[in-house]
Image (tube, rainbow, N blue to C red):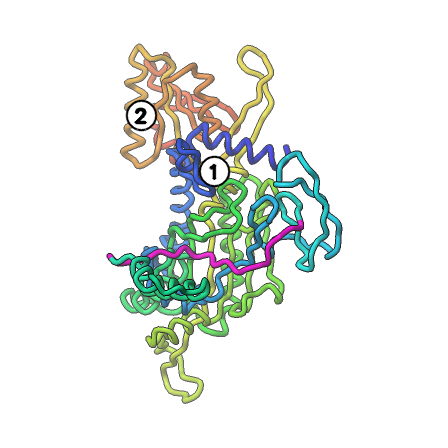
C-alpha cells in the first residue's frame, strides 16, 4: 500500500467512524482546520492522559500548569518570536500558491523547466528557466516566482474595547500619505493593543518559573509540564492533521544545574523514546535523529528529534532540546525580575561559603499531541485477508490501537434485542461506566457486522450476551487482534477487561 493510499484510507475511516471531521464542512470546510469527533477526542484524551500520567503523576520532580493562550507581548519579544519567528515565503505567479522556500529542494539556476499556464492539469505549456534563487513551484513547477519575504508565523489580534483601525483612520484621513507611511502608521496603531496567540506552550513555563518553584518548594532538578493548544500561521499545511495552523502540544521544561544538562538530556531522550514505543505495534517505526551542530538553534547545545515513519517517510514527532539557560536569562533581562535558583545545599565555588545561586539550564521534551494521534492511527491501521461465516473471501479492516489508547475499552453486544439480553448487557455497561472505563452498548445490525465495526474503531474486547448467558451467567469475550473467544462470568467481566488492559 503506497503512502497516498494509506492516508486516503485513514482520512476516509476517520470521517466514517467519527475520529476526525473537516471543520465547517457544511460550508465547504476551512483549510487546515479539523474537528475531532466522538472517537477522535477519546483517542486524543487517552494519549494526553498517558503522557500526563508518565510525566507528572508518576514522578516527584515534575508538576503541571495550564497557562493562558494569550500572554503579554513582551513574552514574545524576550523569546525572540517577534523578531525571528518567521519563514521565507514565496508566491508562485503562475498558480498563485505559496510555499516555504527553505523546505524546497534547490534546482541549478538556469535549468529549463516546463509548466502549464495557470497551474491547470492541462492547457498551454510554458517554458522558462530557474532563477538565481534556485526554486521552482512545488505545485506547478513554474519558475515564475516572487521574491522571498519573511512571513511571521504568529497570529496577531487585539485586546481591549477600542478598535485600532478607527485610530488609524482618524490619524491618516486626508493626509495623502505614501504606502510606506501608511504601513508605518498602521503598525503603530495596531501595536498599542496587539497580542498574539501563543505559537508554543513553552514560554509560560519559563515566565512562571518563580511562582511554581516557590509555591511548590521544588528543588532543582525539577520540571514543569503543560498540555494545550498552540497556533502557527503556517505557510504550508499538509498531510491531514500532521501540519495544521491550530494544534496541541505536550511539553515539559526540566530545570537542572549547569554542567548536568548532558546527562539529563540523554536521560530524557531515552525516556521519551521508551514512552512512544510502549503504545506502538511496530517499535521499529520510531528513531532518534541527533541534530548536527549546524542545525542547532543558537541557544541550544544539543537537540534530538524523535521521528516516526509516517506513510510518506520519517518526520518529527517530538523534539528533545538542551536549551542551556537562554530562556530564563532572556526573560530575566526583559522583565527585570530575577529568574534564578538558590541552592542552600551547595557551596558557592567563588566564596566557598554555603549556598550558591545560578540560572538553571533547561531540557525540553516537546511533543505534538495531534501528530501523536496520526502516528498511532497509522501504526494501528491494518487489513487482514480472511473468510466470513459463509466461507467467502473478506478483507478485515481493524485498528490495532493499544488498549489504553482505544476510545472504547469494551463493547457489550446483546445477541438479540429480546429475551432480556439487552437488560443484561446494559447492566454490564453500567458497571463499566461506574468504574470509569469507557464502554459501548451496541445492539444494531448482526453480530458479525458489530464485530467488524468495533474492529475498525479499535475496540480491544467485545462481550456478547447470548442465550447461554441467561442460563449460566457467562458471556463471550472476543479479542480484537486474534478474534479468539472464551467464556467468562458476567460478574468478572469488568475485572477481566481491566486486568487485560493493565497487562498490555
Residue 467 position by quadrant: top left
Going 38% across and 15% down the picture, which residue do you hit?
A: 415
The residue positioned farthest toward the left in the image shown: 161
In percent of width and height, residue 23 lies at 41, 37
Q: Which residue is mark 2?
A: 428
Q: Which of the marked residues, 1 or 2, is nearer the chain's N terminus?
A: 1
Residue 94 position by quadrant: top right
Which of the two residues, 457 or 174, is positioned nearer the viewer here? 174
151 is within the stretch colored magenta: yes
Residue 292 seen from this side: yes
In percent of width and height, residue 97 lies at 56, 46
Where's the N terminus, which quadrant? top right
Residues packed near mark 1 inside 10 Å, few (<14), some (14 to 19) or many (20 plus):
many
Going 60% across and 32% down the picture, which residue do you hit?
A: 5
Going 53% across and 58% down the picture, which residue do you hit?
A: 87
Residue numbers of the magenta segment: 143-161
Say above or below: 269 vs 402: below
Amino acid at each position: 500500500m503506497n503512502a497516498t493510499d494509506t492516508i486516503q484510507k485513514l482520512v476516509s475511516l476517520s470521517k466514517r467512524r467519527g475520529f476526525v471531521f473537516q471543520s465547517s464542512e457544511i460550508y465547504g470546510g476551512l483549510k487546515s482546520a479539523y474537528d475531532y469527533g466522538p472517537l477522535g477526542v477519546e483517542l486524543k484524551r487517552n494519549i494526553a492522559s498517558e503522557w500526563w500520567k508518565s510525566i507528572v503523576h508518576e514522578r516527584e520532580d515534575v508538576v503541571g500548569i495550564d497557562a493562558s493562550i494569550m500572554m503579554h507581548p513582551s513574552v514574545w519579544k524576550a523569546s525572540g518570536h517577534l523578531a525571528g519567528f518567521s519563514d521565507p515565503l514565496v508566491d508562485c505567479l503562475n498558480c498563485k500558491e505559496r510555499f516555504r522556500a527553505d523546505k524546497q529542494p534547490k534546482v541549478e539556476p538556469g535549468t529549463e523547466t516546463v509548466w502549464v499556464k495557470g497551474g491547470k492539469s492541462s492547457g498551454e505549456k510554458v517554458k522558462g528557466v530557474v532563477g538565481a534563487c534556485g526554486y521552482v513551484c512545488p505545485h506547478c513547477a513554474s519558475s515564475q516566482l516572487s521574491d522571498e519575504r519573511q512571513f511571521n508565523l504568529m497570529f496577531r489580534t487585539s485586546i481591549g474595547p477600542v478598535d485600532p483601525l478607527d485610530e488609524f483612520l482618524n490619524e491618516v484621513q486626508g493626509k495623502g500619505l505614501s504606502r510606506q507611511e501608511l504601513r508605518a502608521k498602521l503598525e503603530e496603531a495596531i501595536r498599542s493593543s496587539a497580542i498574539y496567540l501563543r505559537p508554543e506552550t513553552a514560554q509560560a513555563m519559563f515566565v512562571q518559573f518563580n511562582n511554581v518553584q516557590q509555591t511548590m518548594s521544588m528543588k532543582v532538578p525539577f520540571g514543569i509540564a503543560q498540555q494545550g493548544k498552540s497556533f502557527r500561521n503556517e505557510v504550508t499545511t499538509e498531510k491531514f492533521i500532521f501540519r495544521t495552523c491550530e494544534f496541541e502540544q505536550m511539553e515539559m521544561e526540566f530545570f537542572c544545574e549547569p554542567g548536568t544538562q548532558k546527562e539529563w538530556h540523554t536521560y530524557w531522550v531515552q525516556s521519551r523514546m521508551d514512552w512512544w514505543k510502549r503504545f506502538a505495534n511496530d517499535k521499529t517505526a520510531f528513531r532518534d535523529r541527533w541534530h548536527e551542530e549546524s542545525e542547532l538553534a543558537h541557544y541550544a547545545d544539543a537537540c534530538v528529534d524523535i521521528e516516526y515513519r509516517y506513510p510518506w517517510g520519517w518526520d518529527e514527532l517530538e523534539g528533545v532540546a538542551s536549551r542551556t539557560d537562554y530562556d530564563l536569562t532572556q526573560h530575566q533581562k526583559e522583565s527585570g525580575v530575577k529568574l534564578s535558583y538558590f541552592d542552600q545545599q551547595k557551596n558557592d565555588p567563588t566564596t566557598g561559603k554555603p549556598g550558591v545561586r545560578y540560572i538553571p539550564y533547561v531540557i525540553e521534551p516537546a511533543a505534538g499531541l495531534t501528530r501523536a494521534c496520526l502516528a498511532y492511527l497509522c501504526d494501528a491501521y491494518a487489513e487482514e485477508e480472511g473468510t466470513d461465516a459463509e466461507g467467502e473471501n473478506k478483507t478485515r479492516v481493524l485498528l490495532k490501537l493499544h488498549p489504553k489508547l482505544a476510545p472504547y475499552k469494551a463493547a457489550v453486544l446483546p445477541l438479540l434485542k429480546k429475551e432480556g439480553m439487552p437488560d443484561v448487557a446494559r447492566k454490564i455497561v453500567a458497571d463499566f461506566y461506574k468504574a470509569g472505563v469507557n464502554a459501548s452498548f451496541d445492539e444494531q445490525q448482526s453480530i458479525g457486522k458489530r464485530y467488524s465495526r468495533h474492529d475498525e474503531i479499535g475496540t480491544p474486547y467485545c462481550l456478547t450476551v447470548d442465550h447461554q448467558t441467561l442460563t449460566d451467567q457467562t458471556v463471550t469475550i472476543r479479542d480484537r487482534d486474534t478474534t479468539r473467544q472464551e467464556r467468562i462470568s458476567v460478574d468478572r467481566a469488568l475485572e477481566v477487561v481491566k486486568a487485560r488492559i493493565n497487562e498490555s
